[in-house]
Image: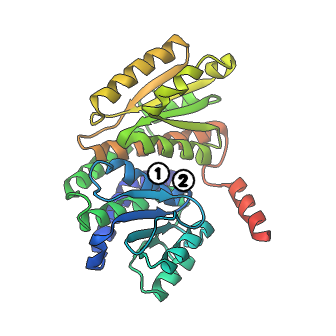
Amino acid sequence: MYGRVCDLPEQIEEGWRIGREIRLPEEYRDVRSVVLVGMGGSAIGGSLLGAYAAREIPVPFSVHRGYGLPAFVNRDTLVIAASYSGGTEETLSGFREARERGARLLALTTGGEIGSLASAWQVPTVRFAYKAQPRATLGYLFTPLLAVFAGLGFLPAQDDAVAESIRVTRALRDAWKREVPASANLAKRLARQLQDRLALVYGAEYLGEVAHRWKTQLNENAKCWAFWEEFPELNHNAVVGYDHPISIGRETVVLILNGTHLSARTARRIGVTSSLLAQHNVAHEEVRGEGESSLAQTLSLVQLGDFVSYYLALLNGVDPTTIEPIDYLKSELARA
């Protein structure tokens, strides 16, 4: 897992190359909606893209985590089936249903049944080969989507932002690698703060889904409870719940993801919320994305969360790679 976390810059670079090489039918530019179907680590790339590009994508874009498809999907919808293994049952159900409805299709996978169906149906496919847990292949499950959306004209050119993101994540890898002591290593320091505490991650706008990514990485890598919330919604409910149970507040650490491209009102909300947390004696810390572009800040914070979850796994004495409860659940479902 450590090697896969360290590989993020190279994954971004290779994923960008693969995504730029895919050639889609011209009529894909005319779709009126886009739906990515996927689960877990295979779906988070779509969620990150949706948050990053929310103000620029000219058509409705959503991520469907579950069986089947939303009712609105039709011939004018582009359905992207994202599954690292190609065998995710929920994603397969949506992929098949999308074909039945005549939707335009794209697959993102290493192969499996989705890869086989895509070949049989002559569906454009972004294929990659990288042995890892799906959650540890983010560069391949996010960056090709970025290239596809730019190629379809749904986003402006992303070359400069991608190049900066690669530079930034390479530099930060050197700052957060295991040879760097905790006294100079932000990822190790945050992991120590989270040890034996409840992790709550706040994000907003283009960083909202990064908070989601932190939550799932802490769950799967560090084998610990973790939750996430998003501004400004959390200001309409969560802040009223800081009082009780008092014991939980004392055992919680809130990490607030911040960046320079957040709106002024959101930035103000973050400041006020930090004050509220302090008033309730809840441990909290702001963590800022690195780089100039919102893409670099997004990916640098993703990278930091991955390192933190890895170091917290070591502190918890657990293997950051295995996912035994998920394996058990899948085996029980297969028996049924």
The residue lying toward the viewer, choosing from 313 and 227, is: 227
Question: Badge 2 is on which residue?
Answer: 1
Q: Residues within 10 Å of mark 1 (few under 14, many from 20)?
A: many
Q: Secondary structure at mark 2?
A: loop
Question: Badge 1 is on which residue?
Answer: 5
The answer to whether the residues at label 1 and label 2 have Cβ atoms under 8 Å apart is yes
Q: Is residue 117 above or below residue 316?
A: below
Residue 7, image x and y in percent? 42, 56
Q: Is residue 268 above or below residue 213?
A: above
Q: Residues within 10 Å of mark 2 (few under 14, many from 20)?
A: some
The C terminus appears in which quarter of the rendering?
bottom right
For badge 1, the amino acid type reads: Val
Q: On the picture, is 226 further left or further right than 183?
A: right
Residue 283, image x and y in percent? 53, 20
Q: On the picture, is 143 further left or further right than 201?
A: left
Q: Secondary structure at mark 1?
A: helix
Q: Residue at x 61, y 41 (%)?
A: 314
Q: Is residue 180 visible?
A: yes
For badge 2, the amino acid type reads: Met
Label 1 – label 2 distance at C-alpha: 6 Å
Q: Residue at x 26, y 61 (%)?
A: 154
In this view, the residue farthest toward the front is 72
The residue lying toward the viewer, choosing from 18 and 174, is: 18
Q: On the picture, is 236 further left or further right than 271?
A: right
Q: Quadrant of residue 257?
A: top left
Q: Residue at x 39, y 41 (%)?
A: 207
